[in-house]
Amino acid sequence: MEVLLPDGWPRPKGYANGVSTKGRMIFIAGMIGWDANYQFQSDDFASQARLALENIVAVLKKANGKPEHITRMTWYVVDKKEYLTASREIGKAFKEVIGFYDIAMTAVQVVALIEDRAKVEIEATAVIPEE
């Protein structure tokens, strides 16, 4: 995977402006912070973010993919301030579950998510290199 950083631009913290890669594309639907039985274990933002990331990795594993194959994520959050307040814990979870930050990412605040207890929903695109 090649990180795309235009000349003269500072390197962003926690994400990449763009990436380029070749391979089998995997599209992962928005994952929220509940377990495999669709049960929320916590109403804490960072805990839900960690579980959403773990759910992404579980789906990716089914395609024989790994976290390093993730090229793009879109984060939907219901409370921007809560997201920013939890940023340290989210960063720790991201590093432990995903392991790197060279992913093109977008985060947007939305009015609500379909599941009332959900605080964050994350969708991802991955590209598994051709062998």
Image (cartoon, rainbow, N blue to C red):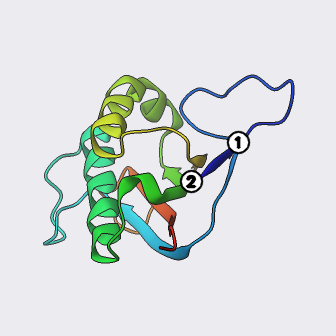
SS assignment at label 2: loop
Residue 85 pos. (x, y %) = 42, 24
Q: Residue at x 27, y 37 (%)?
A: 96
| Label 1 Cα crowd, 10 Å radius (few <14 / some 14-19 / many 20+) | some
Which residue in the structure is indicated by mark 1? 17
Q: Residue at x 68, y 26 (%)?
A: 11
Q: Position of residue 43 (x, y in %)?
A: 23, 45
Left-right relation of 79 to 63: right
Residue nearest the viewer, comparing 79 with 92: 92
Q: Position of residue 58 (x, y in %)?
A: 26, 66
Numbered disc 1: secondary structure: loop
- Dot placed on the residue nearer the N-terminal end, 2 or 1: 1
Of residues 49 and 118, the one drawn nearer to the viewer in this rendering: 49
Image point 56% across, 53% down: which residue?
110
Q: Amino acid at mark 2?
A: Val
Left/right placement of residue 45 relative to residue 129 reads left
CA gap between label 2 and label 1 equals 22 Å
- Residue where numbered disc 2 is placed: 110
Q: Nearer the viewer, residue 18 or 121?
A: 18
